[in-house]
Amino acid sequence: MGELVRFSVAVPEDLLAQFDNLVARRGIAKNRSEVLRDLIRDALVSEEWDDPMQEIVGTLTLVFDHHASDLQSKLDQLQHRHHEQIISAMHVHLDAHNCLEVIVLRGRSDEIRLLAESILGVKGVKHGQLSTTTTGRYL
C-alpha cells in the first residue's frame, strides 16, 4: 500500500450519522478511514468482476436435498467437466436430507459466472450464492 493521502468529503448530516453507525458496527478496530477504504476496495472489486477477462476467485455455496433424483451425479458431472476452474470442494451433511457444498472457483469472470449459474440451476438445488473477489490479474 502506498502513502496515505488525506482528502475531504462533504456529505449530508443524516448520511454521516448512518455511516458512523456502520463504523461502530464494524468493530472496535475500525474507524471512518478504514471503513471508507473497505468500501472503496469493495466497489473496485465489483467493477473488476464486470470485466469478462478479469481473473476472479470465489466460493459457490449451495444447499440441496441429497435424496433428489440423480442430483449428486449431475453436480459431480458439472464439476468434473469444469475441473480447470474448480480449485476445491467441501461437502457437509447438514441433516438426514440436506447437504451443503462449498466450491472454490478460479478463472475468468464470464466463465465463473456461467459455471455458477449452471450449478445453481440444477434441479434439486434449494439455494445457493456466489461470492467473488479478484486477484487483479487479466487472463
Image (cartoon, rainbow, N blue to C red):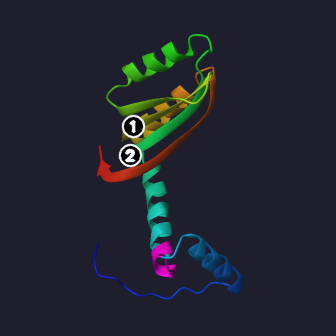
Q: Residue at x 44, y 18 (%)?
A: 76
* Mark 2 or 1: the one toward you: 1
Q: Residue at x 34, y 82 (%)?
A: 4
Instruction: Determine the image quadrant of residue 64.
Output: top right
Measuring from the top left, give residue 121's x and y in whole percent: 59, 26
Residue marked by disc 1: 105
Residue ranking furthest to the front: 96
Residue 56 badge:
2
Measuring from the top left, give residue 35's x and y in whole percent: 50, 73
Q: Nearer the viewer, residue 43 or 29?
A: 29
Question: Quick check: 18 left or right of 1?
Answer: right
Q: Nearer the viewer, residue 4 or 75?
A: 75
Q: Which residues are magenta?
A: 29-35
Per the model, the C-alpha gap separating discs 2 and 1 is 8 Å
Q: Residue at x 51, y 80 (%)?
A: 32
Question: Quick check: 133 left or right of 17?
Answer: left
Measuring from the top left, give residue 86's x and y in whole percent: 36, 31
Q: Is residue 104 above or below residue 45?
A: above
Instruction: Name the amino acid, label 2.
Output: Ile
Question: Quick check: 15 left or right of 24?
Answer: right
Instruction: Name the amino acid, label 1.
Output: Leu
Q: Residues within 10 Å of mark 2 (few under 14, many from 20)?
A: many
Classify the position of the N terminus by image quarter: bottom left
Measuring from the top left, give residue 9's x and y in whole percent: 54, 85
Total marks placed = 2
